[in-house]
């Protein structure tokens, strides 16, 4: 199927390598993207869905038991009053950052390679935000009172305390979930129309047709549509940077050594992008293979994502060492104790798991051989997923378990219900993602078509000129006199 | 099939003419000719946005940003006012001895409210400008038009355009390099 396996290297004369391999036509892109959602359900899909549903039912039981019995079923107590619940929350919301980063930030920077992965990454974002929103909802112990967080007149005549970072967090995460869903849906409309027009049965035509809203590719519609997409990207970019900054203030505004740090907002944002890209890689390595999309989600895309993981992983590593430096530089004994305890205290294993997975493992991406291997990508992405979960665990639990007074020190031991919720949230995530790849177009087909060379209306007329210009740009000595 | 959200069009037997082209470039140049012929109620259709086609069609810039601006500012002002009022007037709370009216801690939620309203208004404003949802449209009765979301490029000229004349407009479209020109009935029919 593929004529070129490697589109990472720059060809000296032809210029940039193609984003999509195999000389695609508009129709072949439509076929490749729509076919997986139209063909018979593969047995592999059921084999993956069943364990996911099993994990999802663990979530149901764990949440049900928690609501029935109260948060005493978890292992947290004084002094560790936040543990798996907030760890899971920050972990999932962090994963949810890659989708918007790919869609919005890379869109504003005109990174055309994003078109092959943005749809799946955005879907992943929404499912991760769903998992994340579960935890603040249930960790308050009385989920039926969650509406107290909303600015509604309630029976006590009080209002939420808007000076609290926890309330900022509620607004940030719910806004982020809403805007991500809008962004995703707006991007889906043209492709839903494709699914509608290709539908073989009336039921499919109606189901896709309702959500396609009667889209008919009108240029007058495209004009407003593209403007809406640009504005949404412009809004989502500061939003995505604000969300994890605000999440980090849940900690940074507190007085606890290990939390009370000004480095937290940028450090959390870098970590969020890092973990989000790792999850995109984990999912796309499997999805592209399973759905036969290797010519659309190519090695070039993984190469780019590996570079982003290497960069953000190194930023996170810098933040870890800067925390130690500031602890020493401040000469604050509580701060110093916290960090020495973090690395060499009872939770040393969590700390060094974090360092190995987050800082050391992505360093292999300095090498082109590693960036070109799907196996390496998959393994490193799993390491990063694990490492980033441990990062949040380390920040939350090791800071809480030994603070100012030795008399109030303690340890945290998770119960089976803590693990049930962690496993269950993965069940929710995988179930949603499997439903997504079964029923919706996994690639933003309209966007991929628009970055093909043939999509340029002046493609035919200027092709010869372009090539000449390209030669000039790459090898000036070949240029005819007077041209530059 | 009359859909549940049909468009409102003037009465008449025909919706207009539909011309098909084989590439984005052909559509682009045809648009320039239809524009120069002075038509106003017509449209181009393509599976993806074609760069620069709004100039070829002679249509202006989208006014959507104004909607976003107004609603975003409403969100900003509303968000700040809500917090100042709720924590300063309706239920003043002493927190760490801080003043009741200080704007600094209210910045994050003000920002989020602004983004939320701006994003919602952008999406629903785009739907309103585009008259979506519109689940029924005469063009959906044309079997050939199904390609528009795959690899088809079309121009539709509506019958109530002041310059529309079935024979003359058909000649114009044929002269722009269309591979097919056909008359589209007012209500759904196949051809």
Image: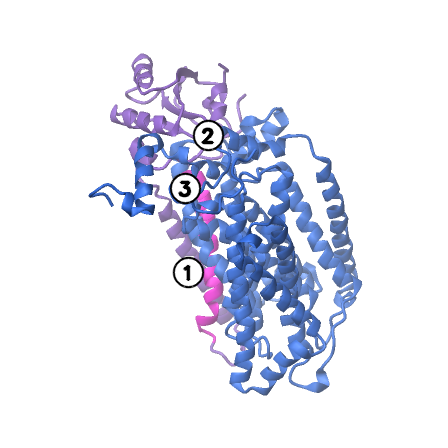
Chain colours: A blue, B purple
**What main secondary structure does the magenta stretch of the protein show?**
helix
Q: Is residue A332 above or below residue A349?
A: below
Residue at 40% x, 49% y: name it: B68
* Residue B178 horizontal/vertical position (percent): 36, 19
Left/right placement of residue A406 relative to residue B52 reads: right
Residue at the farthest left position: A482
Q: Is residue A446 above or below residue B138?
A: below
Left/right placement of residue B70 relative to residue A88 reads: left
Q: Is residue A418 in the magenta section?
A: no
Quarter of the figure with the N terminus of chain A = top right
Q: Which residue is mark 2?
A: A216
- Judged by depth in the image, the label closer to the viewer, 2 or 1, is 2
Residue at 64% x, 58% y: name it: A385
Mark 3 or mark 2, which is nearer the start of the sequence? 2
Give the magenta-colored segment's residue range: B100-129
Q: Secondary structure at mark 3?
A: helix
Left/right placement of residue A407 relative to residue B39 reads: right
Using the numbered discs, state the Cα–Cα distance from disc 2 to disc 3 in whole angstroms.
15 Å
Q: Is residue A434 above or below residue A265?
A: above
Which quadrant of the view contains residue A250?
bottom right
* Residue A437 horizontal/vertical position (percent): 62, 40
Q: Depth check: give the residue in front, A114 or B39.
A: A114
Which quadrant of the view contains residue A174?
bottom right
* Residue A360 horizontal/vertical position (percent): 60, 65
Chain under callout 1: B
- Would you call the spot at circle 1 few (<14 residues within 10 Å), some (14-19), or many (20 or more)? some
Quarter of the figure with the C terminus of chain A = top left
Residue B77 numbered tag: 1
Q: Depth check: give the residue in front, A439 or A115.
A: A115
Chain under callout 3: A
């Amino acid at each position: 199927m593929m004529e070129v396996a490697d589109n990472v290297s720059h060809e000296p004369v032809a210029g940039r390598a193609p984003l999509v391999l195999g000389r695609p036509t508009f129709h072949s892109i439509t076929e490749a993207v729509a076919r997986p959602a139209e063909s018979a359900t593969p047995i592999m899909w059921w084999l993956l869905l069943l364990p996911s549903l099993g994990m999802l039912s663990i979530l149901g039981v764990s949440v049900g038991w928690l609501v029935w019995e109260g948060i005493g079923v978890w292992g947290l107590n004084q002094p560790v009053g936040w543990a798996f619940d907030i760890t899971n929350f920050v972990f999932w919301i962090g994963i949810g950052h890659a989708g918007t980063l790919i869609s919005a930030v890379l869109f504003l920077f005109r990174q055309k390679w994003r078109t092959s992965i943005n749809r799946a990454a955005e879907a992943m974002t929404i499912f991760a935000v769903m998992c994340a929103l579960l935890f603040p909802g249930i960790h308050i112990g009385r989920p039926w009172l969650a509406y107290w967080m909303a600015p509604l007149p309630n029976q006590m005549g009080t209002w939420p305390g808007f000076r609290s970072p926890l309330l900022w967090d509620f607004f940030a995460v719910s806004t982020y979930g809403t805007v991500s869903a809008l962004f995703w849906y707006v991007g889906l409309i043209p492709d839903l129309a494709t699914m509608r027009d290709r539908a073989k049965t009336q039921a499919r035509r109606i189901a896709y047709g309702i959500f396609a809203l009667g889209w008919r590719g009108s240029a007058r519609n495209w004009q407003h549509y593209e403007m809406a997409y640009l504005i949404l990207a412009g809004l989502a970019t500061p939003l995505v940077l604000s969300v994890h900054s605000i999440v980090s203030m849940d900690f940074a505004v507190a007085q606890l050594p290990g939390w009370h740090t000004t480095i937290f907002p940028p450090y959390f944002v870098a970590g969020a992008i890092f973990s989000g890209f790792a999850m995109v890689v984990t999912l796309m390595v499997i999805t592209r293979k399973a759905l036969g999309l290797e010519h659309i989600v190519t090695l070039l895309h993984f190469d780019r994502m590996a570079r982003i993981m290497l960069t953000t992983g190194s930023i996170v590593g810098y933040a870890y060492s800067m925390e130690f430096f500031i602890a020493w530089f401040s000469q604050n004994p509580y701060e110093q104790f916290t960090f020495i305890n973090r690395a060499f205290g009872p939770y040393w294993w969590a700390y060094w798991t974090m360092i190995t997975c987050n800082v050391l493992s992505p360093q292999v991406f300095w090498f082109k051989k590693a960036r070109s291997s799907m196996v390496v990508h998959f393994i490193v992405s799993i390491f990063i997923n694990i490492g980033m979960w441990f990062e949040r665990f380390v920040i939350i639990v090791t800071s809480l378990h030994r603070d100012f007074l030795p008399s109030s020190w303690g340890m945290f031991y998770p119960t089976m219900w803590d693990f049930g919720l962690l496993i269950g949230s993965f069940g929710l995530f995988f179930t949603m993602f499997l439903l997504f790849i079964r029923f919706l177009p996994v690639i933003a087909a309209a966007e991929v078509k628009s970055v093909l060379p043939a999509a340029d209306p002046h493609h035919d007329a200027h092709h010869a000129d372009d090539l000449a210009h390209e030669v000039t740009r790459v090898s000036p000595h070949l240029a005819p006199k007077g041209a530059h | 099939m009359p859909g549940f959200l049909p468009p409102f069009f003037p009465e008449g037997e025909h919706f207009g003419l539909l011309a098909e082209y084989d590439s984005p470039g052909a559509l682009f140049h045809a648009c320039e000719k239809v524009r120069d012929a002075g038509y106003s109620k017509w449209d181009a259709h393509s599976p993806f946005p074609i760069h620069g086609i709004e100039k070829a069609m002679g249509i202006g810039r989208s006014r959507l940003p104004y909607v976003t601006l107004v609603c975003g500012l409403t969100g900003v002002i509303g968000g700040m006012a809500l917090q100042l009022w709720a924590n300063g007037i309706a239920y003043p709370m002493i927190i760490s001895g801080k003043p009741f009216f200080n704007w600094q801690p209210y910045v994050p939620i003000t920002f989020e409210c602004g983004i939320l309203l701006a994003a919602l208004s952008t999406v629903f404003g785009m739907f309103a400008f585009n008259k979506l949802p519109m689940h029924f449209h005469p063009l959906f009765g044309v079997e050939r038009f199904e390609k528009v979301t795959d690899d088809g490029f079309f121009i539709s000229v509506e019958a109530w355009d002041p310059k529309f004349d079935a024979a003359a407009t058909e000649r114009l479209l044929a002269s722009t390099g269309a591979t097919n020109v056909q008359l589209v009935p007012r209500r759904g029919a196949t051809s």
